[in-house]
């Protein structure tokens, strides 16, 4: 116990030292934000009187210790670039299925969907469905073909028969925008979560701990360590969520009918929570619903850290199996979060121990909007289970952030450095070195931006990352695989239409224009621009390709046959390394 | 991959058949998932009454809950259908094509 305490405090001391240094950097860059958050830190100081949540801290330290041992093991087995980016292509279908689930099920989806159900009831399920339906599409259209055509990044596949330079620059830009914004969202989430669960650790210290750990995992252990961190986290999260759902169901006599009627009786909106297909109080909007649907479905299928997972498996067969496993795990998990959300209405709402001010609202919880699942664990299994779930939620963030960082680093090192700057002449050693430096760089950027965005409204981040993935990565990837006529000109112009179109319409849309910039009614009235941008990308890519009469364009069309043979048969695909 | 093997595969009718079959399956299943999901989305937009109707007079459970869980389960089942078909039908054909081409 004493050693653990000492270890904990030395980590915290280190983290607070680094976070002060980070603070200095940030305050010179973003003075307004930093001073705003400075006030919060000062105000948070009295919170130190709350006793430390030892269960959470110890279980989190055990998780960190195990993952560091795995990182050490992975580091001794990571020698080549293929080991570093793709775990030596030795990951089995089941392992990759777990890792996919670990990469995709974020703390936001665990705590967030449970909270959405807790506040709005049935509506939360509509969201879960959208998060899942991208997976079948990934399997049917891209998974196996990615494995057969690519090496480390999805840009390998798009540039298979197209011009390396312009394609990789475009793909790297869109990947990096997605990765960096997704990282900011995760970092802000990590900071708020850890600070709420263990008030003795400040927001900044939490983010620095996350940043330091993922830099260690990824630079030393590469994809092998990342994969195993994701597998363990997926196991813990699925196990923890299953126990919670079982706890809820046993409290309700294993009757869904009783669970839902009890929830209706307790929730202040009563039967409304079964009758609203929009957030309670909002207005239905068909175009918005469809655009959100397109964004979630095709965005999932265009996330660079998800696509990267298909290069780690042994062959196309393992790639396809891994999606089946992953889809089952993720679907099961979303059904669990739905039960957990309703369970929280029954067991957490109206309980003085959890509710902030019961005379005002029986729903609003201490510690904020993402707490229903956390308190439900306490209601079911006391301090010990709360500690476990808190540690799992934090482990979840580490796993997602590791995958993201590696995907971003591979775009920088493999696409930009090795393929564009060195024109394919970089040695493996140089490329991996650049990759590791990129990991450190991205880790530091994530920490700094996470701190800078503490008090910012980050609700648009999902819309931004998924829109770019759905409007750029996904359509260009699918066109390059299935359409002989695509040329470099079409892919590049289409790709930039996707990037600029999504960002532009998001800025003039309600989430940024009205809510972040406070500029009044939005010029573009929809939160999700995909229903406009995705067709525009397809149209631009089509016309720019068919009107491309250049000699190189013709060569690219002719090269489609060879690409198709490799995509379909796997002949010439990258082999699993022998060790 | 040598040019000879490539041209052997290119001229093998089994290969052309495989590409056609697999593309058909991929796009049909993708269309099914899209119809299912966007059908659900359109119901949310235009006929929310159907989704919010209770499954029976004595129940508080709305139809939409069953449909939503149904879409999740059906998505998983369709991925299963693809994997079953690819493992059982396509993989042996691919092996045969490769064997014949490398002769």
Image (spheres, coloured by chain):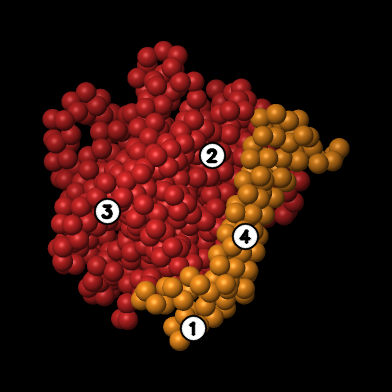
Chain colours: A red, B orange
* Residue at image point 22% right, 43% down: A445
| C-beta proximity under 8 Å, tags 2 and 1 | no
Q: CA distance from mark 1 to mark 4?
A: 24 Å
User: In the figure, residue A490 lies in which quadrant?
Assistant: top left
| Badge 3: chain ID | A
Vertical relation: A300 (above or below) A524? below
Q: CA distance from mark 2 to mark 1?
A: 41 Å
| C-beta proximity under 8 Å, tags 4 and 3 | no
Residue A542 image point, x, y percent: 45, 41
Say the numbered circle drawn on residue B25. Answer: 4
* Residue at image point 55% right, 53% down: A137
**Residue at numbered disc 1:** B99
Residue A297 image point, x, y percent: 53, 45
Of labels 1 and 4, the one closer to you:
1
| Badge 4: chain ID | B
Q: CA distance from mark 3 to mark 1?
A: 32 Å
Q: Residue furthest right?
A: B57
Labels 2 and 1 share a subunit: no
| Badge 1: chain ID | B
Labels 3 and 1 share a subunit: no
Vertical relation: A171 (above or below) A330? above
Q: Residues within 10 Å of mark 2 (few under 14, many from 20)?
A: many
Of labels 2 and 4, the one closer to you:
4
User: In the figure, residue A264 lies in which quadrant?
Assistant: top right
Report the side of A178 relative to B62 (left or right).
left
**Residue at numbered disc 3:** A164
**Residue at numbered disc 2:** A294
Q: Residues within 10 Å of mark 3 (few under 14, many from 20)?
A: many
Q: Nearer the viewer, residue A13 or B43?
A: B43
């Amino acid at each position: 116990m004493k050693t653990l305490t000492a270890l904990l405090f030395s980590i915290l001391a280190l983290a607070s030292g680094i976070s002060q240094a980070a603070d200095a950097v940030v305050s010179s860059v973003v003075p307004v934000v930093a001073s705003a958050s400075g006030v919060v830190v000062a105000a948070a100081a009295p919170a130190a009187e709350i006793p430390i949540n030892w269960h959470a801290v110890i279980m989190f330290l055990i998780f960190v210790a195990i993952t560091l041992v795995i990182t050490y093991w992975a580091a001794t087995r990571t020698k080549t670039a293929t080991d570093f980016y793709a775990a030596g292509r030795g990951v089995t279908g089941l392992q990759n299925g777990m890792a996919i689930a670990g990469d995709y099920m974020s703390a936001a989806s665990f705590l967030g969907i449970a909270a959405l159900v807790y506040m709005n009831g049935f509506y939360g399920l509509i969201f879960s469905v959208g998060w899942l339906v991208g997976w079948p599409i990934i399997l049917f259209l891209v998974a196996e073909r990615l494995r057969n055509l690519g090496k480390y990044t999805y840009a390998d596949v798009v540039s298979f028969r197209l011009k390396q330079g312009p394609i990789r620059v475009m793909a790297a830009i869109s990947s990096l925008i997605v990765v960096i914004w997704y990282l900011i969202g995760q970092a802000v989430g990590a900071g708020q979560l850890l600070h709420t669960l263990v008030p003795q650790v400040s927001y900044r210290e939490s983010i620095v701990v996350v940043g330091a750990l993922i830099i260690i995992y990824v630079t030393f252990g590469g994809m092998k360590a990342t994969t195993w961190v994701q597998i363990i986290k997926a196991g813990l999260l699925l196990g923890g969520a299953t126990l919670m759902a079982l706890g809820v169901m046993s409290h309700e006599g294993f009757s869904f009918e009783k669970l839902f009627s009890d929830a209706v009786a307790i929730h202040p909106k009563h039967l409304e929570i079964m009758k609203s297909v929009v957030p309670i109080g909002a207005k239905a909007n068909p175009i918005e619903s469809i655009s959100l649907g397109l964004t979630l479905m095709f965005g999932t299928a265009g996330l660079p850290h998800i696509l990267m997972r298909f290069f780690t498996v042994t062959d196309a067969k393992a790639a396809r199996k891994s999606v089946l496993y992953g889809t089952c795990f993720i679907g099961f998990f979303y059904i669990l979060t739905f039960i957990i959300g309703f369970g929280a209405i029954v067991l957490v709402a109206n309980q003085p121990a959890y509710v902030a001010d019961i005379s005002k609202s029986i729903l609003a919880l201490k510690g904020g909007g993402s707490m229903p699942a956390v308190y439900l664990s306490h209601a079911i299994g006391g301090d010990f289970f709360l500690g476990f779930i808190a540690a799992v939620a934090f482990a979840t963030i580490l796993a997602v952030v590791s995958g993201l960082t590696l995907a971003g680093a591979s775009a920088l090192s493999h696409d930009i450095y090795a393929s564009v700057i060195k024109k394919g002449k970089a040695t493996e050693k140089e490329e991996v070195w650049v990759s590791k430096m990129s990991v450190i760089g991205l880790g530091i950027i994530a920490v700094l931006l996470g701190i800078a965005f503490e008090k910012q409204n980050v609700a648009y981040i999902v819309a931004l990352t998924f829109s770019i993935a759905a409007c750029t990565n996904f359509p260009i990837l699918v066109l390059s695989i299935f359409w002989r006529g695509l040329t470099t000109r079409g892919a590049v112009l289409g790709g930039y239409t996707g990037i600029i179109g999504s960002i532009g319409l998001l800025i003039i849309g309600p989430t940024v224009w009205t809510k972040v910039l406070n500029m009044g009614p939005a010029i573009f009235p929809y939160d999700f621009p995909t229903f406009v941008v995705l067709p525009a990308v397809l149209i631009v890519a089509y016309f720019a390709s068919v009107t491309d009469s250049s000699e190189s364009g013709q060569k690219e069309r002719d090269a489609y046959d060879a690409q198709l043979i490799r995509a379909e048969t796997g002949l010439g695909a990258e082999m699993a390394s022998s060790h | 991959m040598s040019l000879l093997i490539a041209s052997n595969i290119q001229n093998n009718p089994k290969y052309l058949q495989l590409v056609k079959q697999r593309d058909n399956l991929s796009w049909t299943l993708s269309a099914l998932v899209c119809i299912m999901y966007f059908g659900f989305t359109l119901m949310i937009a235009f006929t929310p009454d159907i989704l919010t109707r209770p499954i029976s007079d004595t129940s508080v459970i709305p139809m939409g809950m069953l449909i939503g869980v149904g879409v999740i389960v059906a998505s998983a089942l369709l991925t299963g259908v693809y994997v079953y078909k690819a493992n059982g039908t396509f993989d042996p054909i691919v092996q045969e094509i490769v064997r014949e081409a490398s002769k």
